Amino acid sequence: MAIFSVYVVNKAGGLIYQYDNYVPRAEVEKTFSFPLDLVLKVHDEKVIVSFGQRDGIRVGHAVLSINGVDVNGRSTGDGKEILEFLKDSANYPVSIRFGRARLTSNEKLMLASMFHSLFAIGSQLSPEVGSSGIEMLETDTFKLHCFQTLTGIKFIVLADPRQAGIDALLRKIYEIYSDYALKNPFYSLEMPIRCELFDQNLKSALEIAEKAGTFGPGS
């Protein structure tokens, strides 16, 4: 069981904190001969597989490294266009590592804003007045848990579907936010959280939740 990540979204829908606690990596590295038997394309400044699944490589997987060197978006480590590099038979055999593309900071900001809108829509769709909004979304690989405070701050945790104690964890994160962000004289409301004590106590809370799933008095 694992807790994957934590997001804090302000009342306007802006992402003010994000922490990746555990990101499972499903990566495949293979050596290819010319011509490459996969179809690649550029999407959102990344080179991804558009056709030709094989040996654990899936459509949507991105090129992460070439010959052991991490790529930089659509370019190789030394600045060459990946698609052009792979068209040249002189560059073969070539070792390519594929996997799920990592979310960029801008993508995380966009996703936080989208969830804020979905949360508002969920509240408006409720047949009863005073709906709490979306508290949980479930998929086959993770659950998204959300706790919104009276002031509109949303604490979001993505965790393994089998992970217990998330409700207690969300309230613990709110407590940490109150103690180490709100009481910090240098912190401005609604702004990004940059506080070392907040980071340290959040990581400690995640470790406790993963091991025990609960928080005892004084934890």
Image (cartoon, grey):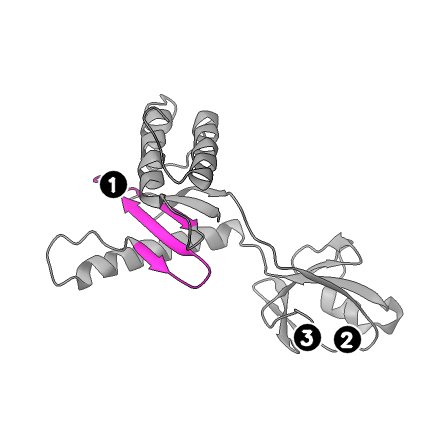
Which amino acid, mark 2? Leu
**Residue at the limit of the structure toward the left, as seen here:** 129
Q: In this figure, which residue is indicated by the disc labeled 3?
A: 54
**Residue 77 among those drawn in magenta:** no
Q: Which mark is residue 36?
A: 2
Q: Position of residue 147 (x, y in %)?
A: 29, 45
Q: Is residue 32 above or below residue 179?
A: below
In this view, the mark in front (2 or 3): 3
Can residue 142 be seen here? The reply is yes
Q: In this image, 84 relative to 63: left or right?
A: right
Do the CB atoms of the residues marked 3 and 1 lie less than 8 Å apart? no
Q: CA distance from mark 2 to mark 3?
A: 12 Å
**Residue at the limit of the structure toward the top, as seen here:** 185
In this view, the mark in front (3 or 1): 3
**Residue 155 among those drawn in magenta:** yes
**Magenta segment boundaries in residue numbering:** 136-158
Q: CA distance from mark 1 to mark 2?
A: 52 Å
Which amino acid, mark 1? Thr
Residue 141 or 5: which is nearer the viewer? Answer: 141
Q: Quadrant of residue 198?
A: top left
Q: Which mark is residue 149?
A: 1
Q: Position of residue 210 (x, y in %)?
A: 46, 41
Check disc 3 and report its element: helix, strand or loop: loop
Q: Quadrant of residue 171?
A: top left
